[in-house]
């Protein structure tokens, strides 16, 4: 009896039948695109939880970080605040609410969202209706000008290519289709694999040249490693549990660790790279402890417990504090202090 496979499974299987195995990057790209198009992946009922979904403190501190950068860069009158992959719009909402307390900065800022998912655009439009955002499919479509860019858990969603060292030399890892099992399989086992993400490198270069040419700064936050690492990191999450990335493509969140050293290389010729430091170091450096205390003062007992548990999740070594990294890009001639990185 045929297995109960989803639409995208059938489509990819057909493509492989016709043209042969596809690269891991192509498979991941198709699965991620379908996933974000149809699913609302966030929160307790979804597949994963991100820092802005855990606590408002994350976006508030990033809002203050941007305000600080803007002041140190001479308070330009027109600022494009650009978020890559805004999800449900929580981070942008917390940043915009925070900078509302700084009228001059607020007046200078317009909000620009790079988002491919029509479904998430609708949610963002609702959450961010007070701030009249504009949407773009790609970063390079955002009009030029001084910009402050933030990307939280954006790069981990971009496709990775995988390579394996074999006796015949370097080979790319492919996804094939087993007709008898009605299942996808990898052309090579997981040992000795390394990954690259050409699209991540391209976007980093685009961000960097924009900042070099028009001024501004970028803040990249994601889970991953500071040094180039050997090993497969492609993973799928369903309802907060690991799942098989080759099953039900498009139904699970599919990601890979971000190689910060590769992003750094793509940026370095154009801008100064600050960090990466760990998310724990960054948030502590920006005073998350004090912010949590202030929030606790006006909170009920139950709220206080939530605030303290959010603080723990965002900063503790065994939670998001160490695995997540933060890296900033600033113009080469800027010569400014960047808050949160002096560890
Ligand atoms: N930053 C948010 C959501 C992260 S999930 C948060 O922290 O909660 C990844 C986001 O990137 C989603 O909004 C997804 O639709 C978007 N995305 C994924 N691939 C993309 C691409 N190639 N171009 C633009 N947006 C993309």
Image: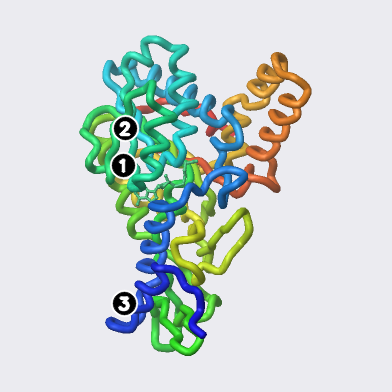
| Rendered image: mark on residue 342 | none
| Rendered image: mark on residue 207 | 1
Q: CA distance from mark 2 to mark 1?
A: 14 Å
- Residue 278: image location, x then y, percent: 58, 42
Q: In this rendering, is residue 263 above or below 332?
A: below
Q: Quadrant of the C terminus?
A: top right
Callout 1: SS: helix
Q: Residue furthest top?
A: 103
Which is nearer the N-term, disc 2 or disc 3? 3
Q: Give neighbour class at mark 3: few <14, some 14-19, many 20+ (Cα, 10 Å).
A: some
Q: In this rendering, is residue 31 above or below 204?
A: below
Residue closest to the eye, 83 or 116: 116
Question: At x 61% / y 24%, what residue is drawn?
Answer: 287
Question: At x 43% / y 20%, what residue is drawn?
Answer: 67
Which is nearer the N-term, disc 1 or disc 3? 3
Q: In this rendering, is residue 78 above or below 21?
A: above
Residue for badge 2: 112
Q: Using the rendered image of the protein, determine whether residue 132 is visible from the camera's viewpoint.
A: yes
Callout 3: SS: helix
Closer mark to the observer between disc 2 and disc 1: 2
Q: CA distance from mark 1 to mark 3?
A: 34 Å
Residue for badge 3: 15
Is disc 2's CB within 8 Å of ligand 1?
A: no
Q: CA distance from mark 2 to mark 3?
A: 36 Å
């Amino acid at each position: 009896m045929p297995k109960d496979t989803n639409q995208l499974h059938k489509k990819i299987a057909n493509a492989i039948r016709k043209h042969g195995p596809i690269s891991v990057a192509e498979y991941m790209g198709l699965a991620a695109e379908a996933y974000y198009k149809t699913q609302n992946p966030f929160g307790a009922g979804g597949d994963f939880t991100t820092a802005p979904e855990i606590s408002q403190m994350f976006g508030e501190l990033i809002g203050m970080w941007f305000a600080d950068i803007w002041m140190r860069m001479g308070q330009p009158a027109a600022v494009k605040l650009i978020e890559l992959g805004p999800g449900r719009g929580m981070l942008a909402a917390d940043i915009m609410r925070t900078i509302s307390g700084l009228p001059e900065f607020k007046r200078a800022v317009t909000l620009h969202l790079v988002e491919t998912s029509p479904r998430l655009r609708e949610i963002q439009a609702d959450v961010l209706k007070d701030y009249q955002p504009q949407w773009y499919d790609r970063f390079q479509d955002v009009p030029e000008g001084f910009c402050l860019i933030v990307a939280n858990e954006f790069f981990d969603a971009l496709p990775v290519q995988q390579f394996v060292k074999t006796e015949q030399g370097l080979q790319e890892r492919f996804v094939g289709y087993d007709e008898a099992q009605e299942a996808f399989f990898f052309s090579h086992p997981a040992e000795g694999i390394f990954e690259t993400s050409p699209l991540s490198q391209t976007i980093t270069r685009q961000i960097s040249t924009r900042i070099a040419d028009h001024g501004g700064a970028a803040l990249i936050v994601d889970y991953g490693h500071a040094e180039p690492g050997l090993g497969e990191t492609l993973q799928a999450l369903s309802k907060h549990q690991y799942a098989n990335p080759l099953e039900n493509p498009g139904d699970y969140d599919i990601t890979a660790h971000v190689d910060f050293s590769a992003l750094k290389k793509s940026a370095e010729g154009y801008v100064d790279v600050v960090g990466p430091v760990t998310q724990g170091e960054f948030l502590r450096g920006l005073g998350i402890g004090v912010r949590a205390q202030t929030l606790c003062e006006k909170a009920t007992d139950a709220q206080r417990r939530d605030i303290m548990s959010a603080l723990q999740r965002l900063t503790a070594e065994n939670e998001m504090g160490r695995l997540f990294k933060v890296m900033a890009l600033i113009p080469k001639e800027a010569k400014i202090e960047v808050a949160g990185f002096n560890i």
